[in-house]
Image (cartoon, rainbow, N blue to C red):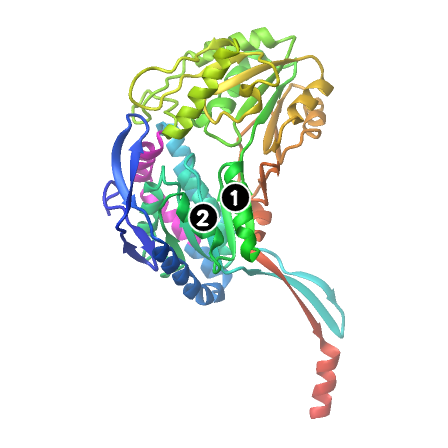
Amino acid sequence: MDFFKDYTLTIDGQAATSAATLEVINPANEQVIARVPDASREQLDAAVAAAKRAFPAWSALPLAERQRYVARIGDAIERHAEDFMKLLTLEQGKARQGAEWEIGGAAIWCHEIAKQELPLHVVEDSGTRRVETRRVPLGVVGGITPWNFPVLLAIWKIAPALVAGNTMVLKPSPYTPLTTLKLGELLRGVLPDGVLNIVSGGNELGAWITAHPDIAKVSFTGSTATGRKIMESASGNLKRITLELGGNDPAIVLPDVDVEEVAEKLFWASFQNSAQFCVAAKRLYVHEDIYDDLAKALVAYAKTVQVGDGALPQTQLGPIQNRMQFEKLKNLLADAKANKLRFLLGGDIPDQPGYLVPITLIDNPPDDSRVVREEAFGPVLPLLKFKDVDEVVARANDTEYGLAASVWSRDVEAARQVAERIDAGTVWINEIHTFSPHVAFGGRKQSGIGIENALEGLAEYTAVQTLAINRAQASDAGRKAA
């Protein structure tokens, strides 16, 4: 197969095209690099029907067999890792090290999720009665993935859904469909027909998926605004939903840190993937005793980081992925300038092709400023000064989001006391962005519903069934028959 041309849908194990197409843009230079199918309503119906037909046989397979199939997905990604990485950089923009992290992680997730098993829970097992609770698959799952980590976050949905016994229809972001469509092509013949169907399209296709009567669950990663729409649409037939949504994650830096040592870690905590990361540190709270020193250290380190075309070997941070997000960042920076906020670094977007935004650090803006209240989802970071722990905890929690946070200190116990007070699904201490297939991840408040990863995430793709067995009655009936 050629990774760099001929992009097709995968429906019932077969390639499919469509009359309508979508352009895919390289964000580094704004050039059209491909056209992909814009699936019709009829093609979505065909994909769902294929998944529905495949479900009885797939769910009836022994768990060990489904696990082997999912492990083979990881094997296939590993075999074609280089092509996946090059294509990912072309469509998403990320630099080489980011592409390696994503594609390598996708393979690891397949292999590790393939080892997971939900235990049978025996509630009662007496001589005459047994009550057990087991987990059973839901049916057809609809997956909708974002443009910041298109391959990895697709696997976060595919692997547990299939291990649990479901079949799937997956829709990638229209901004980054290429790697996902090629994944579908690669897995034709690896998976039984209909088990995994991949359809590309715009927002209308996403709306059809969330409302489709034969889809039992939707798993979505993306913005909070879209998550609300999905929740409303899914209510039509009471679909199960998992929503991993936005975040405005605080990082709290206590005064005892080694400033020079922590500056580099905090930089990447904030700017990895050009800050197009739901769990990027987006509000950096620094104790007043070290604020000036840490600000200087961050500026100095940031000046050593290369921003540019992710395909160039010297690039460390690539462009913003799409024009819509690029324009939002331009508007945010214009607002900061209009309100006379002080820039420690950056703030001026070059007049050239590509969605390049420079690393931007803003000096202690007011808490009610847009750069503090809004999720930038790009390389714009406010540095915020604080005096004491009670104050910073209150400020950190003053947001509609609750996805993740981090606390940095030499005193781990002091950091833990702060971390336990943060309203977030994940709080890291002296580290950040350490994910695992075996560690639960999910948000609070407007950051989402449900869990991904770990056994808790696997369980999201199942329903509970309780079996209550009366052995006494069966024994009585047997004696009478005898």
Magenta range is 70-93
Q: Quadrant of the C terminus?
A: bottom right
Q: Give percent across and percent down for residue 153.
A: 45, 41
Q: Residue at x 45, y 64 (%)?
A: 55
Amino acid at dot 2: Ala
**Relative side of 306 to 332, left or right:** left
**Residue nearest the viewer, comparing 412 with 156:** 156
Marks 2 and 1: in contact by CB < 8 Å? Answer: yes
**Residue nearest the viewer, comparing 412 with 142:** 142
Mark 1 and mark 2 lie on one chain; the one further toward the N terminus is 2
Q: Check disc 1: other Cα within 10 Å, few if <14, some if 14-19, many if 20+.
A: few
Q: Which residue is the site of mark 2?
A: 207
Q: Secondary structure at mark 2?
A: helix
**Residue nearest the viewer, comparing 101 with 299:** 299
Q: Is residue 60 visible?
A: yes
Q: Look at the image and say whether residue 89 sits in the magenta stretch.
A: yes
Q: Is residue 158 visible?
A: no
Q: Secondary structure at mark 1?
A: helix
Q: Which residue is the site of mark 1?
A: 229
**Relative side of 131 to 80, left or right:** right
